[in-house]
Image (spheres, rainbow, N blue to C red):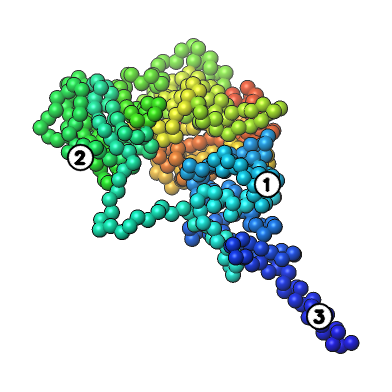
């Protein structure tokens, strides 16, 4: 009897010990015995821990991890379709689409079957880590001892060792020329990808950096139509009435072609690409020729009526020379987030533009000097937006947006800024602007207060030279928010909040 009792106790003890064992099979897939384990599962991306707001789980021998935590760490983008319950992951040249609770997924449009479907747990979308990460070229390992998923980003294929590494840019600049006194043209053998246009002072000049680019003519001789070449290499002197004093260019480093445009007094430059992106043009104009800029004018009776209607005050005279850039988010082929109301798709880009145009009307009435990044449904590249504002030497940048998430739960309003430690510029604080604008929006819209948040990784905020904020009015993925943002009341109150805060910011920037 005693021997039998000991055997029973040993069996129970073995069951307790083995209940939470997790191990990896020969293929590196995670496996669990029935009963699971209460130990947390960690994630390492290129050796750096990934912080998740909900813990990863193991189901049917596969690890599911929160999609947003991982792919935001990988600089990917996510899009959620509430109607089809699909999550779309964009990273590099890959697009992976998974449907909640479905074992059918697709990679770049090619459907495949997966072992475990994506799931929503505690309001977060969890995806099978091995399938998705290997689909985009990552390697995945399971550390059984530390219960950690180890993800390594794709590595470039190493070539045979060479005495000296030679970098071959993917974009070859074929010519740099002046088509007339106000347009500089850059022709390339392949599409222009990343670039940066920025302004420098003392002396005034614009600088255009073309990244991953090289010159076909290594001697750097300038190709031009019109103008007079000087004896100094790489320098072009234009007519005395030109907006430019000269143009210089060179291979700035092994991966960058730099073009420097010396300005003749106060002028602006805008960079545009043709349809196949093999021709880039910088068009120059003086202060009186900016099409989208509202000129300062005295307050008319019509303008006063608009101010009275919305309870706004005019911009004081001393602040009228400060330029405000209004950027309606997305546009054209870039729809932004998509919401669904009674089965009808609603594009974020259309709401953003409608609100921005209302802001424009209010600021014009107040006598503010403003520039609209777009006034129609057109596609404008992300970096082009900040480069426009930088070349205009704007004092303030506000981008109108609305939010979305991969579930319908999140709701409310938030305002994003670069950093609380960012120094004031031209008497304006980006941090104060965000805090004041968030308070104004909450008071007027009455939605849930998600706060003003520092977001230094966002291109709109990190690439602008002036204080900048992004307003996220509401969530297209939340039915209540979406229904409200489709009303005229929401859009007018959103616009009024933005206009009122901008006017106060401008006026305070010049007050003693």
The quarter holding residue 497 reads top right
Crowd class of label 1 (few under 14; some 14 to 19; many from 20; radius 10 Å): some
- Identify the residue shown where x is 53% and y is 17%: 306
Q: Which residue is mark 1?
A: 103
Question: Of the residues under marks 2 and 3, which one precedes in the sequence?
Answer: 3
Task: Determine the image quadrant of residue 495.
Answer: top right
User: Which residue is nearer to you in this view: 177 or 401?
Assistant: 177
Image-quadrant location for residue 196: top left
Of residues 154 and 206, the one drawn nearer to the viewer in this rendering: 154
Position in image of residue 400 (x %, y %): 52, 31
From the viewer's side, name the closer residue of 408 and 37.
37
Secondary structure, mark 3, is: helix
Q: Earlier in the sequence, mark 2 or mark 1?
A: 1
Considering every residue shown, the one lying at the far left of the view is 231
The extreme bottom residue here reads 2
Q: Measured along the vertical axis of the image, is residue 315 above or below residue 198? A: above
Q: CA distance from mark 2 to mark 3?
A: 83 Å
Whichever of labels 3 and 1 marks the residue nearer the N terminus, that label is 3
Height in image: 498 above or below 40? above
Which element type, helix, strand or loop, lies under badge 1? loop
Q: Going by the image, does 325 lie left or right of 211?
A: right
Residue tagged 3: 9
- Residue that badge 2 annotates: 218
**476 and 118: which is toward the camera:** 118
Query: Residue 6 location, x and y as percent?
Result: 82, 84
Furthest residue toward top: 301
Residue in the picture at 46% in, 53% down: 154
Which label lies toward us, 2 or 1? 1
Do we see residue 115 in this rendering?
Answer: yes
**Gap between marks 2 and 1, in whole Å?**
55 Å
Q: Are marks 2 and 3 in contact (CB under 8 Å)?
A: no
User: Does residue 359 appear to the left or right of 39 in the view shown?
Assistant: left
């Amino acid at each position: 009897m005693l021997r039998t009792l000991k055997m029973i106790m040993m069996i129970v003890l073995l069951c307790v010990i083995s209940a939470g064992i997790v191990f990896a099979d020969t293929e590196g897939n995670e496996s669990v015995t029935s009963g699971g384990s209460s130990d947390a599962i960690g994630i390492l991306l290129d050796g750096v821990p990934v912080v998740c707001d909900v813990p990863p789980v193991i189901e049917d021998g596969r690890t599911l991890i929160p999609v947003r935590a991982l792919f935001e760490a990988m600089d990917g983008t996510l899009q959620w379709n509430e109607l089809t319950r699909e999550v779309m992951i964009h990273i590099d040249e890959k697009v992976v689409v998974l449907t909640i609770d479905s074992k059918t997924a697709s990679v770049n449009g090619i459907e495949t079957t997966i072992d475990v479907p994506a799931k929503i747990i505690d309001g977060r979308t969890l995806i099978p880590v091995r399938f998705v990460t290997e689909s985009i070229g990552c390697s995945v390992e399971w550390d059984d001892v530390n219960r950690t998923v180890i993800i390594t980003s794709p590595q470039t294929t190493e070539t045979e060792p060479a005495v000296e590494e030679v970098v071959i840019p993917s974009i070859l600049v074929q010519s740099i020329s002046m088509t007339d006194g106000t347009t500089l043209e850059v022709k390339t053998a392949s599409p222009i990808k990343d670039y940066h246009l920025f302004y420098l002072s003392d002396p005034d000049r614009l600088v255009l950096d073309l990244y991953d680019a090289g010159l076909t003519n290594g001697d750097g001789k300038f190709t031009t139509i019109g103008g007079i070449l000087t004896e100094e290499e790489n320098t072009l002197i234009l007519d005395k009435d030109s907006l430019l004093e000269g143009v210089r260019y060179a291979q700035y480093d092994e991966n960058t072609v730099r073009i420097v445009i010396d300005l003749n007094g106060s002028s602006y430059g805008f960079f545009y690409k043709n349809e196949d992106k093999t021709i880039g043009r910088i068009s120059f104009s003086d202060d009186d020729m900016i099409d989208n800029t509202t000129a300062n004018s005295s307050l008319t009776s019509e303008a006063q009526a608009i101010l009275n209607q919305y309870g706004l005050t005019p911009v004081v005279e001393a602040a009228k020379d400060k330029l405000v850039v209004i950027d309606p988010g997305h546009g054209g082929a870039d729809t932004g987030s998509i919401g669904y109301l009674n089965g009808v798709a609603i594009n974020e880009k259309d709401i953003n533009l409608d609100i921005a145009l209302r802001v424009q009307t209010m600021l014009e009435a107040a006598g503010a000097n403003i520039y609209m990044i777009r006034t129609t449904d057109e596609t404008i590249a992300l970096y082009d937006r900040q480069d426009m504002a930088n070349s205009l030497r704007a004092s303030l940048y506000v981008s109108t947006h609305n939010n979305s998430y991969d579930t319908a739960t999140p709701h409310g309003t938030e305002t994003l800024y670069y950093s609380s430690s960012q120094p004031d510029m031209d008497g304006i604080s980006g941090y104060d602007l965000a805090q004041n604008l968030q308070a104004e929006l909450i008071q007027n819209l009455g939605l849930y207060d998600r706060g003003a948040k520092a977001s230094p990784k966002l291109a709109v905020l990190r690439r602008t030279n002036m204080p900048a904020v992004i307003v996220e009015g509401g969530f297209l993925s939340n039915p209540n928010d979406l229904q409200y943002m489709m009303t005229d009341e929401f859009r007018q109150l959103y616009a009024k909040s933005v206009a009122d805060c901008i006017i106060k910011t401008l006026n305070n920037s010049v007050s003693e």
